[in-house]
Image (cartoon, coloured by chain):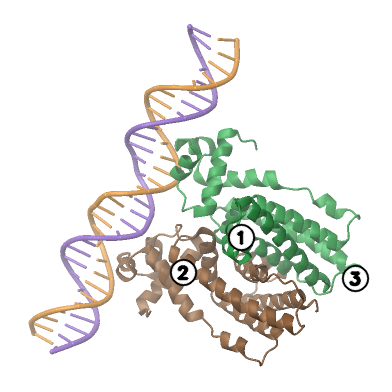
Chain colours: A brown, B green, C orange, D purple
Amino acid sequence: MEYNDKQVLIIQAAEKLFAANGFEGTSVRDIAHDAGINIAMISYYFGSKEKLMEAIFAYRISYTRLTIESLLQSDKYTPIQKIEKIIDSYTEKLMAHQCFYKLMAQEQSIREIQQISELIYDSKAKNLEMVKKIVQEGQKNGDFVKNIDVPLMMVTLIGTGMQFVVSQDFYKKFYKMEDASDEEFKKLMKKKLNHHLKSLFKAFLTNEA
Amino acid sequence: MEYNDKQVLIIQAAEKLFAANGFEGTSVRDIAHDAGINIAMISYYFGSKEKLMEAIFAYRISYTRLTIESLLQSDKYTPIQKIEKIIDSYTEKLMAHQCFYKLMAQEQSIREIQQISELIYDSKAKNLEMVKKIVQEGQKNGDFVKNIDVPLMMVTLIGTGMQFVVSQDFYKKFYKMEDASDEEFKKLMKKKLNHHLKSLFKAFLTNEA
DNA sequence: GTTTAAATCAAACGATTGTTTAATTTTGTG
DNA sequence: CACAAAATTAAACAATCGTTTGATTTAAAC
């Protein structure tokens, strides 16, 4: 699906406002005002407010889908290196599109639009299978410990990321970064999150530091 | 704050519907219908829809606040045992009041009501300080490793719990529990979550199984 | 320059929103 | 029973919601 400049403008405004105020908490007039276009343009281009939400997901997913799968199937990396690659990819996407992940968090909880719920479901299932294979590989060659609950491991990975984006402001003060620039703060936070996830899962999977 | 039977009825209906459809996605008529009362009773008892939301938090917090603090300050437990006590308390509350925690997850992301945001903020700060002390104690006596990012450790704890409640249905199939009773399923999930968190944080804090 | 389609607009649409009113019923007290 | 306070109701309130209309402007094609 291709979107013209005006459509992208609307999508980006909607993404921002939906993330901040929720789907039901954002009116099409808010979006139109923020995007600097007439209200009727939303129905004109997308059909409805719901379809606009679907467009946001279609737009983001087409732009954030990284082909790390081929990377993971190769023999160039050890299982723990593959997990680290996944964490790199996840933290990168998370920090680059925070609004979108806030939206995903909301949709997970509220389930407003059937099609989006299915999209999230499929994405989870795909990621789970991918990680499952890596874990089994690591257990086979003795790198990883036995009895790893992969679904719950994924809950921790996704949950940590999601919680991170919704409570970033809170942790600003605990890292004494209140007067740092947004860009500076974001950069440090990404680094911290990345390192945290890597040491967390290395300890969990291998019982080593 | 004390609430009479009718007020509790309204609070419980609102909690359920807010969790399922969001604050803005739930009308006062929906709540009134579900609680079996007249619409006007909501304004009559609580003043407004917003104040009803505040009442939910006041109600739940007064009923779920467990005094584990005194337990944690005693010398009867090792630092790792104290962490386990916190996990026990957290999983217990999480599974007993899933709707409420869904609501918390939404409020964290959307920030609809100032007073509630502050309540969540204070709760986070309090929990962070509590865990910080335990971690320092564990590091002092050599039980825990060095360089533990406690704020991010809390992100993982809370995030895992929150993600767990919003995606429980998804994981139902992966544990082959689709035809188990709700109570049976809930019991197993609580056990699994509890065990997962304990082994995760034990590995993270001590690098041991 | 004319024609046709796409884009944009202000205005209006009916439906639904949270809240209030004023009347009525229920409850508790003397 | 009589009275006052509390609880409950249907109805109405103005405001806002997402969407549509029909007219107008802009852009593209010949």
Q: Nearer the viewer, mark 1 or mark 2?
A: 1
Establish if B144 lies above or below A5: above
Q: Position of residue B178 (x, y in %)?
A: 57, 59
User: Residue B177 — which label?
Assistant: 1
Query: Residue at left 75%, top 53%?
Result: B89
Establish if D8 lies above or below B207: above
Q: Chain of mark 1?
A: B
Q: Position of residue B46 (x, y in %)?
A: 54, 39
Judging depth in this view, the residue of B56 and A206 nearest the camera is A206
- Judge whether residue A11 can be spotted in this image: yes
Query: Residue at left 70%, top 61%?
Result: B192
Q: Nearer the viewer, mark 3 or mark 1?
A: 1
Q: Determine which residue is flagged by label 2.
A: A15
Same chain letter for marks 1 and 2 = no
Q: Earlier in the sequence, mark 3 or mark 1?
A: 3
Q: Position of residue B157 (x, y in %)?
A: 70, 64
Which element carries disc 2, helix, strand or loop?
A: helix
Dot 1 amino acid type: Met
Dot 2 amino acid type: Glu
Which quadrant would residue D23 be assigned to in this image?
bottom left
Does residue A46 appear to the left or right of A145 in the view shown? left
Q: Chain of mark 2?
A: A
Query: Residue at left 63%, top 77%?
Result: A131
Q: Position of residue A170 (x, y in %)?
A: 65, 64
CB-based contact (under 8 Å), mark 3 and mark 2: no
